[in-house]
Amino acid sequence: MGIISSQKHHNQHGILNPAVTKGPSIVKRNFVSTNPNYLRTLSQTHAGWIFGAIAELIDNSRDAGASRLDISIQSMFSKQAGQKVPVLCVVDNGHGMTYAQMMRMVSFGHKGPNEHCQDQIGRFGIGFKTGAMELGRDAFVLTQTSTSRSVSFLSQSFNENKDNLEIPVVTYCKKDQYMEVDLGVQSEATAEYNLNAIKKFSPFNEYFIGEKVGLFGEEGTGTQVYIWNLDRWGTNYTLEWNSQKTDESPDSHGNGDILIRSRRVRSRPGQTNGNVPLDYSLKAYVEVMFLNPQMKITVQGSPVNTHMPS
């Protein structure tokens, strides 16, 4: 199920990014030779435990050498929905991903694990796809290294009624102090086509992406994952969160958390306590499961203090 390419002449005008330079007018679209319904199948990996899906994303940030990781749910405007929708945001300041690493993360059917990363949990390249698709139907990734920037869009909404899964990816390379579309890995037309797809089916455009780049801080590197059309539990979302955490007021005064709405307690041998917060509180779960972390983690703006389970 590897990436295959489809070429066609692209007649649309109005390039979205002014940094795009002249290049061939052929669109090479990233298709995966698998049915888009496979994304729904992937989501079943963590069907019994949604925090396991978030843990996959935390592991990826740890593997990237991040010293800071912020996890929150915020409201963003969705053109598809015509209103603001909740978006799970996972933002780290790790070393980011190159184009090749980004393609490995979103592609299917690797020959084997990354032998150069024996100590990294995410070296098999499957955690992002299984985790993201359990948490929601659509995921946007923005990643930046010291010399490149890439965006990708893994989306069930974008791929509805398609025979093969299509994954828009755009990569930029650093030239002097600016990022320009990397014509070594895609044409101008491909970049335009993929950015148009991202604009139409996600809350992101080139201006919003530029705003999010500012979150990388002084080092200027890291990865940001945004997931929306979140998983539902009945008529509500599977997750619930501190409503005070917003784009305009990111500080939750230490009380922020993301919770599993059902509050279901997992069964364990010999367990007598009927209230186990780590089963439904993301903050409590991270405090126990990510001991001695290499990075400072916040959940809905509230710092996580790791400790051994009692």
Image (cartoon, grey):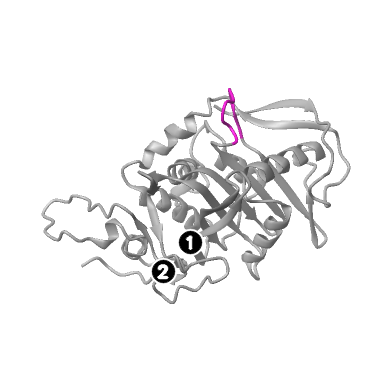
Q: Residue under circle 2?
A: 256
Give the left or right position of residue 215, taking residue 230 as reference: right
Contact, CB < 8 Å: mark 1 with mark 2? yes
Residue 16 vertical placement versus 156 (above, below): below
* x and y, in percent, of residue 137 in the image: 50, 41
* Residue that sits furthest to the right in the current view: 22
* Region of the chain picked out in magenta, as a range: 158-166
Q: Is residue 106 left or right of residue 73?
A: right
Q: Outermost residue toward the bottom?
A: 253
Which residue is the site of mark 1?
Answer: 72
Q: Residue at x 81, y 40 (%)?
A: 188
Identify whether 146 is placed above or below 186. Answer: below
Q: How many marks?
A: 2
SS state under label 1? strand
Q: Nearer the viewer, residue 214 or 231?
A: 231
> The N terminus appears in which quarter of the rendering?
top right
Mark 1 is surrounded, within 10 Å at the Cα level, by few (under 14), some (14 to 19) or many (20 or more) other residues, namely many
The kind of residue tagged 1 is Ser
Quadrant occupied by the C terminus: bottom left
In the figure, residue 185 lies in which quadrant?
Answer: top right
Give percent across and percent down for residue 213.
67, 61
